[in-house]
């Protein structure tokens, strides 16, 4: 008898749980030969809205953690990914990568998580300042997270694109809702399983699968999304996102034609693209008359 293989149905990752899509619709993920290798959820508007609710609840407690602790948790994600690298190598090769390409992508993803973990308690030193003002006060400018960030992850990368967009967003205290690559989605929910076991509070990272064209209008118009990252080259999609963002003045970041494997695409300045500058005035009092002490 010819045996019919039972394909795994990958769920979504929302609020630290793995629900099925509200729509009940799935699509076949195909290998390079056109053979189905998994069933992936086709996320709906309702799935996205549920994810934003969870991201909003998680964002403030996550931002209130120490920067050092957020760095520890990113490092823990890297540790867990290292322990499961054989699985990700296999999944990337199923999606068309050679063994060498798969190894490079997995190892670069692990290294990138560690890179941003190291910046967790340091990026403020290069992006914040004590401002030179005249008066009996200090003037400080510091970076604070924007809030909930919606992400359209790179279509051409199953793992490194996901890691490279999530890590710099959450390290400053943001939460995120990410639409993973549609054609290379095999690693996305496997990565969610890594996140789930890595001390990341539920709701900080939410990962959806499905069609970007269908979901971009909902990502860009949601009133409780503070910022959006689009990784792609579709000019119509970029224009639509920019126009829709005016409804609540979302900050829009577009990354076009990026090779996420290159070191030049990891930077502390990518962290600050999803932060806002807060300036504080702190009064001081001189000790004595015309002396220089305070």
Image (spheres, grey):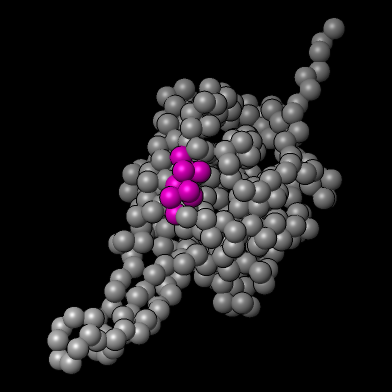
- Quarter of the image for the N terminus: give it: top right
Give the percent coordinates (x, y) of residue 17.
72, 44
290 horizontally vs 91: left or right? left
The quadrant in which residue 238 appears is bottom right
Up-down: is 253 above or below 91? below
Dominant SS type (magenta): helix
167 horizontally vs 289: left or right? right
| Residue visible at 52% across and 38% down in the picture | 77
Outermost front residue: 288
| Residue visible at 66% across and 69% down in the picture | 224
| Residue visible at 42% across and 58% down in the picture | 271
Tell me if residue 130 is in the magenta stretch. no
The quadrant in which residue 249 appears is bottom right
Q: Which residues are magenta?
A: 67-75
| Residue visible at 41% across and 40% down in the picture | 114
Outermost left residue: 291
Give the percent coordinates (x, y) of residue 22.
82, 50
Give the percent coordinates (x, y) of residue 4.
81, 18
286 horizontally vs 180: left or right? left
Give the percent coordinates (x, y) of residue 282.
37, 81
- Quarter of the image for the C terminus: give it: bottom left
């Amino acid at each position: 008898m010819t045996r019919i293989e039972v394909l795994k149905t990958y769920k979504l990752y929302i609020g630290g749980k793995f629900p099925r899509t509200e729509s009940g619709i799935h699509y076949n993920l195909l290998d390079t030969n056109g053979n189905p290798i998994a069933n992936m959820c086709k996320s709906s508007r309702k799935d996205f809205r549920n994810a934003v609710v969870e991201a909003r609840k998680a964002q403030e407690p996550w931002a209130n953690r120490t920067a050092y602790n957020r760095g520890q948790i990113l490092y823990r994600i890297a540790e867990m990914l290292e322990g499961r690298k054989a699985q990700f190598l296999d999944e990337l090769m199923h999606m068309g990568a050679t063994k060498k390409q798969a190894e490079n992508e997995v190892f670069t993803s692990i290294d990138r998580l560690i890179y941003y973990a190291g910046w967790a308690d340091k990026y403020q030193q290069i992006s914040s300042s004590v401002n030179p003002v005249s008066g009996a006060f200090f003037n400080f400018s510091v970076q604070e997270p924007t809030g909930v960030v919606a992400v359209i992850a790179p279509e051409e990368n199953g793992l490194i694109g996901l890691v490279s967009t999530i890590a710099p967003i959450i390290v400053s205290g943001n939460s995120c809702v990410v639409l993973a690559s549609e054609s290379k989605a095999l690693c996305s929910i496997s990565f969610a399983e890594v996140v789930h076991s890595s001390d990341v509070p539920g709701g900080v990272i939410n990962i959806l699968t499905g069609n970007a064209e269908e979901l971009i209008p909902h990502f860009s118009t949601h009133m409780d999304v503070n910022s959006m990252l689009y990784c792609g080259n579709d000019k119509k999609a970029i224009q639509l996102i920019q126009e829709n963002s005016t409804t609540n003045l979302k900050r829009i970041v577009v990354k076009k034609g990026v090779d996420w494997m290159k070191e030049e695409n990891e930077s502390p300045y990518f962290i600050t693209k999803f932060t806002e500058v807060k300036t504080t005035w702190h009064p001081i009092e001189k000790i004595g008359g015309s002396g220089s002490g305070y």
